């Protein structure tokens, strides 16, 4: 890719997402969907009527709702829609990318690793090209 001339404002770049080794299973990182949002998803979910509890963040509660197929899953998805600027789906190597204008974004996704469900809620300041690796170090437990 050609480098954007310095001094150009709001040029943007490519946000490259790669899912690191999560488990010994092969291809556990392929076909994962990650939402890229222009607003903190926690804010969007709370605004949409979801709540945190003493034992779980509003994000954990939303992912649990989707795992349990309760109405809060759909409610949360609708709340996130206006803030979603892209959906990045990983290829066979666990990599995905999306071109975005410069700015602050949140990458949101979850994965089953062994018998546990993990999630990512990663803040990324994009100025030009930027890559972010999602792995066990920055994952949060869902359950």
Image: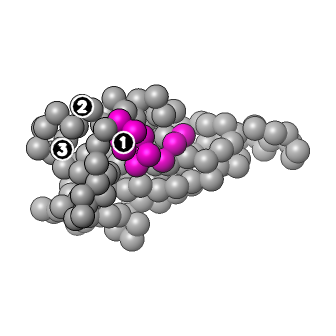
**CB-based contact (under 8 Å), mark 1 and mark 3:** no
Image coords of residue 24 (percent x, y): 23, 66
**Label 1 vs 3, first from the N-terminus:** 1
**Which residue carries the number 1 mark?**
45
Image coords of residue 30 (percent x, y): 31, 46
Instruction: Look at the image and give the residue range highlighted in magenta.
Output: 38-48
Q: In this view, does 113 lie above or below 58?
A: below
Image coords of residue 106 (percent x, y): 50, 48
Q: In which quarter of the image is the C terminus?
A: bottom left
In the rendered structure, the answer to whether residue 51 lies left or right of residue 16 reads left
Distance CA(mark 1)–CA(mark 3): 12 Å
**Which residue carries the number 3 mark?**
65
Q: Is residue 72 magenta?
A: no
**CB-based contact (under 8 Å), mark 3 and mark 2:** no
In the rendered structure, the answer to whether residue 67 lies left or right of residue 14 reads left
Nearer to us: label 1 or label 3: 1
Under circle 2, the secondary element is helix
- Furthest residue to the bottom? 137
**CB-based contact (under 8 Å), mark 2 and mark 1:** no
**Which residue carries the number 2 mark?**
74
The residue carrying pointer 3 sits among few (fewer than 14), some (14 to 19) or many (20 or more) residues within 10 Å by Cα, namely some
Distance CA(mark 3)–CA(mark 2): 9 Å
The residue carrying pointer 2 sits among few (fewer than 14), some (14 to 19) or many (20 or more) residues within 10 Å by Cα, namely some
């Amino acid at each position: 890719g050609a480098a954007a001339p310095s001094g150009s404002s709001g040029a943007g770049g490519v946000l490259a997402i790669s899912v690191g080794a999560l488990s010994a299973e092969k291809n556990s990182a392929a076909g994962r969907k990650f939402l890229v949002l222009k607003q903190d998803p926690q804010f969007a979910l709370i605004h949409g009527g979801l709540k945190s509890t003493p034992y779980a963040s509003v994000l954990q509660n939303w992912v649990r709702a989707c795992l349990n197929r309760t109405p809060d899953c759909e409610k949360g998805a609708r709340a996130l829609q206006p803030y979603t600027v892209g959906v990045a789906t990983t290829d066979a190597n666990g990599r995905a990318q999306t071109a975005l204008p410069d700015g602050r974004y949140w990458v949101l996704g979850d994965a089953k690793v062994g018998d546990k469900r993990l999630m990512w809620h990663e803040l990324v300041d994009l100025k030009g090209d930027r890559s972010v690796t999602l792995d066990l170090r920055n994952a949060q437990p869902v359950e």
